Amino acid sequence: MGSFDRKVERNQKKMYKSGKGPAVKTRSNRDPRTALGPKGDGEIFKGRKIILPVVLALLAVLYGVIGTVGNTAELSSTIFWLTIVLYLLLALMIFLRRPYLRIDRNWLYTSKYNRDKIIEANNISKIKVSKNRSKITIVPKSKDVNWVFSRSRNLFDTQAMAAHLEQYAKVHHVAFETE
């Protein structure tokens, strides 16, 4: 186990020297990898999740209707009402947590699967925009999942996003495609 610890320390020193360690600072004296979220620097585009909250609210209403029409013994149960309230609370939480895309100088930030994600400009393979600019896809160079921003699904302002991403692609020499 001791040799493994030495290897880890040696690799950490190499990463710090190459500027890829966890404490790399920018000119504004902030670490861009820890400054996640929609409250940082750069241009921020926020959407709104609607499909999943509506489905959860409909499930809560359906569960309530079936419970009131069916057996009356379950109607007085606290777990019955707690389930309905929790479904509605989950729908409200998902509705209020807005998806975003933040375009910083060299980084792009977003939230995917309830986690904040970040990608550097040199790790982007290409940026694809649909003809009517209703869907934007950011394709990373690695085998990570594509970032897809849609006007119909998450109510993003994809027109403005496409314009800013086109400028971002020109500055960082990233392929920009219009499908």
Image: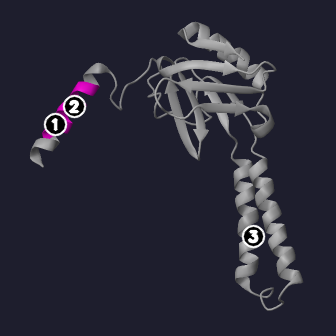
Q: Residue furthest left?
A: 2
Q: Amino acid at mark 2?
A: Asn
Question: Is 77 positioned to the left or the right of 140 in the image?
Answer: right
Is residue 24 or residue 155 the one in the foreground? 155
- Residue shown at 17% from the left, 32% from the top: 10
Please give left or right for residue 9 compared with residue 135 in the image.
left
Local secondary structure at mark 3:
helix
> Is 95 a magenta residue?
no
- Looking at the image, is 176 positioned above or below residue 83? above
Q: Residue furthest bottom?
A: 73
**Residue found farthest to the right:** 69
**Up-down: is 23 above or below 130?**
below
Residue type pointed to by label 3: Val
Q: Which residues are magenta?
A: 6-15
Does the residue at mark 1 contact the one at mark 2 (Cβ under 8 Å)?
A: yes
> Of label 1 and label 3, which has the lower sequence position?
1
Magenta stretch secondary structure, dominant:
helix
Q: Position of residue 176 (x, y in %)?
A: 63, 13
Label total for image: 3
Which residue is tagged 3?
A: 85
Residue 177 spot, x, y in % from top left? 66, 14
The foreground one among 160 and 125 is: 125
Q: Secondary structure at mark 1?
A: helix
Quarter of the image for residue 130 reads top right
Identify the residue position indicated by label 1 in the image. 7
Q: In the rendered image, which quarter is residue 4 located in?
A: top left
- Give the number of the disc on residue 11: 2
